Image (cartoon, helix red, strand yellow):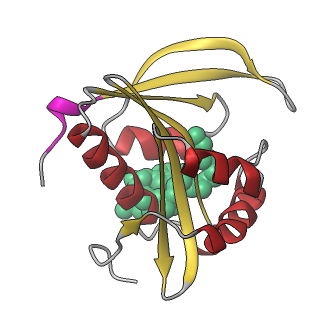
Amino acid sequence: MVRGQVSARQPLPEELPALAAIDLLSNPGPWSEQNFLELMQNPFGLLLACFRGRRAAGFIACEIQGELLAVDQLAVHPELRRQGFAAELLREAVRRGEAAGCTLATLEVRRGNSGALAFYRAAGFECAGVRPGLYRDPPEDGVVMTLKIDCKEKD
Ligand SMILES: CC(C)(COP(=O)(O)OP(=O)(O)OC[C@H]1O[C@@H](n2cnc3c(N)ncnc32)[C@H](O)[C@@H]1OP(=O)(O)O)[C@@H](O)C(=O)NCCC(=O)NCCS
């Protein structure tokens, strides 16, 4: 995979099991197929996926809450990381959020998730605070990160 050739699009309903399988491999609180389906059916939901050929590589799940783009879940298959999939998913989500009038993207990350923290920092997010005890199973603080969309670097 050459960076720059990755593209993100809305998945088809029959592609949701593959996204749930990636989440199971990636996140301590993985989403079920039903969670993905509900987001797809939510008028304020934004679900995008990336593919290598026909194989699902990763996804991003967001909600548009007025001027806020809330990133709920993001995962890339462990075999396909560090190839630019998540960066493209986030870029496309922010582009669509901006088109819908969002001015700020926000998300929470487990404090010990150094890979995700580094990814979001590399994408321009800044730490906006800590929510003690936000997560369970295992219990952990959440780091709140934000990105000013109207100030983001343009391609
Ligand atoms: C975080 C995650 C989504 C990143 O996906 P990815 O496709 O590997 O990320 P990208 O290839 O687009 O990375 C872009 C840049 O982010 C940074 N980055 C990404 N992963 C990183 C890591 N593990 N450590 C340090 N920096 C990282 C790098 O700067 C990278 O650029 P480079 O590869 O040229 O150095 C992926 O590691 C993942 O699915 N993790 C498990 C689930 C998770 O933590 N989700 C987020 C919960 S909020």
Q: What residue is shown at x 49% (from left), y 82% (from top)?
A: 52
- Using the image as rendered, state which of residue 91 and residue 79 is in the foreground: 91
Task: Please indicate, yes or no, whether residue 114 appears anywhere in the rendered image.
Answer: no
> Where is residue 63 drawn, in percent x and y?
48, 36
On-image quarter of the C terminus: bottom left
Q: Is residue 98 visible?
A: yes
Marks counted in the figure total: 0
- Give the residue furthest to the right: 137
Question: Which x, y percent locates residue 54?
Answer: 54, 86
Q: Is residue 25 above or below residue 31?
A: below
Closest to the observer: 69 or 122? Answer: 69
Residue found at the far bottom of this picture: 53
Where, quadrant-wise, is the N terminus in this rendering? Answer: bottom left
* 84 relative position to 141: left or right: left
Q: Residue at x 30, y 37 (%)?
A: 124
Q: Which residues are magenta?
A: 148-153
Relative vertical location of residue 52 with respect to residue 34 in this rendering, above or below: below
Q: Position of residue 152 (x, y in %)?
A: 19, 37
Image spot of residue 106 (x, y percent): 43, 27
